[in-house]
Amino acid sequence: MVNPQRTIPHLAFRTAALTLGLLATGAGAATPAKTVAILTPFQQSVTTNQMIASLQAQAAQRGWKTNVVDTKGDVGQLASRMEDVISAKVNAIVIVSTDPNQLKNQIRAANDAKIPVFGLDSGYISGMAMNATSDNTALGKTITQYLFKAMNGKGNLVVLTYRPHPGVLKRTQALDAALKANPGIKVVTEQEVQVPGPIENSRKQMENILLANSRKGAITAVWAGWDEPAIGAAQALQAAGRDDIIVVGIDGTSQAVSLIQKGSPIKATLKQNFPQMAVLVAQQIDRVFKGQKVSATELYAPATLVTRQP
């Protein structure tokens, strides 16, 4: 005869043993969180840092882990660190504000390891999943048209840029094309801005350019490939008391917009939607994690022209 008082403990023991067995084999266990590696040489840049913070927030909402790698301007080291995260078998890699042509071998290695590579305000090359940015050619055209109109189609121009960045390169190439169509505007000098530290470097470069071109009218305007060089140039112009020189930038950072509204030499910028770029990338990572194809290899976030309010 079975003792009913012993039946329940016996069943409980068997149930517990079955549960432990399932856990031991991994059945029913929670799926490990996806890991997204975020790599950049320029996290000190205001806009790059903004994009990374936005992407991290998007990842957190989806339960992904993030690993941010900043090589502080050293692109060579970035290649090595990308190899490290590939070896660590992350689930996705995002390169931020980086020319992917400098990482071709690493992107190929990521493909071999079945790790998708996404661009955030970077360029797109074969082997990547996609890139989200602004339409940088359109940005270059728009800010250049504004500036050339403000210059009445003539004068002497200083160019502060950084062609190694794929987005800034496209903007500068749009300037190159506009200069060919407007022979009344001459380039006094084109200077490559040092990164990190673009504001301080641009200020020092502008101080030297002013010393070499001190005559009034020798410089009419400054075209900056993004806001930080525009800010540095404006600081130098204000310190020299030069209110006759127009400056334009691109990005729409809070500091640049504030300087525009205060009547500084910076007269216009194009406000990019950097948080939205990160949203676009996160959406495409999510699609790939779900086994879907990306919507497109290049996605653009809109930009808005900012000038002084009357």
Image (cartoon, grey):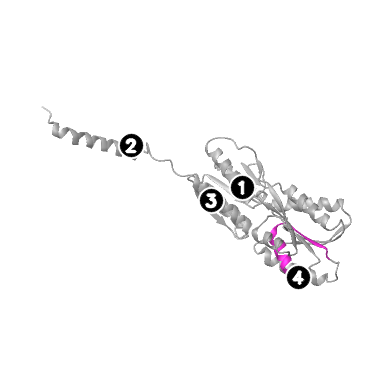
> Is residue 54 among what the camera can see?
yes
Whether the residues at callouts 3 and 4 have beta carbons within 8 Å, the answer is no
State which tag comes first along the sequence, 4 or 1: 4
Please name the residue shown 19% across and 34% down the image.
8
Q: Amino acid at mark 4?
A: Glu
| Residue marked by disc 1 | 276
Q: CA gap, disc 2 to disc 3?
A: 34 Å
The image position of residue 269, as x and y in percent, is 72, 56
Q: Amino acid at mark 3?
A: Gln
State which tag comes first along the sequence, 2 or 3: 2
Left or right of 112 on screen, residue 243: right
The image position of residue 51, as x and y in percent, is 60, 52
Q: Amino acid at mark 2?
A: Leu
Quarter-wise, where is residue 257 in the image? bottom right
Please tell me how crowded label 1 is: few (under 14), some (14-19), or many (20+) other residues with Cα within 10 Å. Answer: some
> Is residue 193 among what the camera can see?
no
Please name the residue shown 55% across and 55% down the image.
69
| Residue marked by disc 4 | 207
Q: CA gap, disc 3 to disc 4?
A: 38 Å
Please tell me how crowded label 4 is: few (under 14), some (14-19), or many (20+) other residues with Cα within 10 Å. Answer: some
List the single residue furthest toward the front.
Answer: 310
Please name the residue shown 34% across and 39% down the image.
23
| Residue marked by disc 3 | 56
- Of discs 1 and 3, which sits in the foreground? 1
